[in-house]
Structure formats: structure tokens, C-alpha cells
DNA sequence: TATAGTGTACCACTACGATATTACACCGCA
DNA sequence: TGCGGTGTAATATCGTAGTGGTACACTATA
């Protein structure tokens, strides 16, 4: 799964699961793989996956069924979206604007770069 | 100086010194404060400042005079600018574009936000 | 030559991330 | 009821990053 060395693995797994949910690969209300399955497929220790699940559970994104496993919460999509918008406004945007001003990068540069990005994706 | 808990202090100090250089508060060729001065004024250990200086020295941004102190290198401005543009293109922009697509944020939102940012700054 | 200022090397401590192993309590289903 | 699947809790260990404390070598200058 290509872990970045800069961020803790358990956070990257949690983010990755959120991605899967947002992209519909994990249905709302559906079950997600067990901690042991994840540990094996990602070649990671069980405890590491447990920490990822704890984050998501605390955020209300997944819900536990004792003895059965974890399921995607009904409100998962809203919660993930809300959290990401918050982080975008609080971290990504201010940093972007600061760099733009410091480096003298115009809005036109950003816009044309975005168009290239969209073309490259599809 | 308000350190973020997410990034190591010595990196934040290095970035901060680069800011000072780019904004002309430290003149090219001029001397920067000693490790002990920084340690006292930032309420940080000497070694922490030393690590910051090591980064800047390795990048060629500051130069050492044995027994005297550190000085801003002649090419400092070019080096800092080049490094920041690289990081902007390699990290900030791709992350921005990815979030925009995922969250459905338009270029117009970015542009109008930037105008508000500029007005708020001055 | 002293002295006070540089940077630096060395060692220690702490926190954190990740791993490894084990044992436990719960649930579904044959 | 028993088995195999869930998650969980506890403990120990390892490596590394970040920071701190101290003593040292060097240079400028009076």
C-alpha cells in the first residue's frame, strides 16, 4: 500500500479506509475487513490496525458489533466529508495562500495547473 | 515564536530563519544570531538550534566562520526560493488538487479565498 | 596571555511508533 | 455445545526522533 515514512502507519491506514468509503468501495452499513485480515494483507502488526480502527470508531465513522466486526456507520460519509473540509480550510488553504504570496504565484497558475491535473487523471 | 506540535522544533527554526532572510531582516552576507542567543530567546536547547543551523549549512544557505558565527551565504536567496518552489510543486499543489477534486471545491472558491487572504494581510 | 564569545561532540533521557506474543471475552453457526 | 471467527487487553521489546546537559576546542580581542 506504499506507506509514507513521514506519517504514522496507523494514520495512513485510517485515511485509506476513509478513501475507500468515500469512493464507495466500502458500502455504508457494510462490514469492513477484520483487524487480522488487514494486518496480513498490509504486512503490518495487528496492534497497528487496531489503532487505526480506534481512530475511526472515536470519530463515529465505523461501528463495532461485538464478536462480529466493524461496520461503516450510516453518517460516515458526512463525518468524513466534514472533517476533510475542516482540515482543508484550516491547513491546506492558509498554507497555499502563504506560499503563493511568498513565491509570487498567481491564481492563473493554480487554475491552469488544476486543469492539467484533471486531464491527467482521466 | 509559537511552535507547532506537529513538526520538529529544529525544522521550524530553520524555516523561520529562511523567512527572515527572504524578507530582508537578515542581510545577505550578514551575521545571524549565535546558537546560544537563539536557544535563550526561543527557550530551547542549544542542540536544537544547532540542528537547525546544520540543515541550513548543508543546503548552502548559511556559512560558518570558525569561532565567529554563521553568516548568510551570497546565494541564500536563490537557494531558498528554488527549494520552496520545488516543494510547492511536488507537495502543496498535488495535495491541493486532490482535495479539490475529492471535496468538489472549485477554482473560483480558491481565487475568492485568496483575495480575502490578501485583504486580511494588509 | 586571559577572557568571553563562537560552534561542537558526547552522553542520557523521553516519547512515540511499531512489533511480537499471549490470553481473554464475545458471537455465529454447524 | 464446540469451533472458528470477531475485537481487546496486557506486556515486553526495539528503534528512532527530539530534546536536554555538560564539557571541550576554537577565535577574536582587550
Image: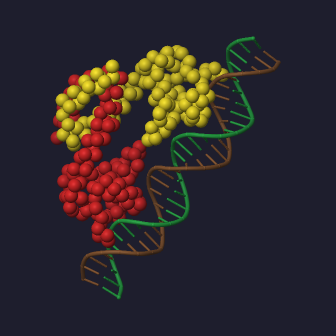
Chain colours: A yellow, B red, C green, D brown
Side (left or right) of B1 relative to B112: right
Side (left or right) of D3 relative to B66: right
Q: Residue at x 43, y 19 (%)?
A: A23
Side (left or right) of B29 relative to B3: left
Residue B69 lies, in percent from the top left, at 29, 66
- Say which quadrant the C terminus of chain B sits in: top left
- Considering only vertical position in the picture, is C29 above or below B51? above
Q: Which residue is drawn at 57% across and 28% down?
A: A41
Side (left or right) of C19 relative to A113: right
Q: Which residue is drawn at 39% across and 23% down?
A: A81
Q: Which of B103 and B61 is in front in this view?
A: B61
- Considering only vertical position in the picture, is A103 above or below B97? below
- Considering only vertical position in the picture, is B21 above or below C20? below
Q: Is residue A94 visible?
A: no
Q: Is residue A68 visible?
A: yes
Q: Nearer the viewer, residue B108 or B96?
A: B96
Quadrant housing residue D3: top right
- Considering only vertical position in the picture, is D24 above or below C8? below
Amino acid at each position: 500500500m506504499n506507506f509514507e515514512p513521514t506519517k504514522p502507519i496507523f494514520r495512513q491506514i485510517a485515511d485509506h479506509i476513509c478513501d475507500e468509503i468515500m469512493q464507495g468501495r466500502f458500502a455504508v452499513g457494510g462490514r469492513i475487513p477484520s483487524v487480522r485480515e488487514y494486518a496480513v494483507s498490509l504486512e503490518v502488526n495487528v496492534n497497528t490496525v487496531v489503532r487505526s480502527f480506534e481512530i475511526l470508531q472515536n470519530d463515529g465513522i465505523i461501528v463495532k458489533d461485538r464478536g462480529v466486526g466493524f461496520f461503516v456507520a450510516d453518517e460516515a460519509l458526512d463525518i468524513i466529508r466534514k472533517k476533510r473540509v475542516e482540515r482543508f480550510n484550516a491547513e491546506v488553504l492558509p498554507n497555499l495562500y502563504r506560499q503563493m504570496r511568498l513565491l509570487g504565484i498567481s491564481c492563473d497558475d493554480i487554475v491552469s495547473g488544476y486543469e492539467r491535473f484533471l486531464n491527467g487523471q482521466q
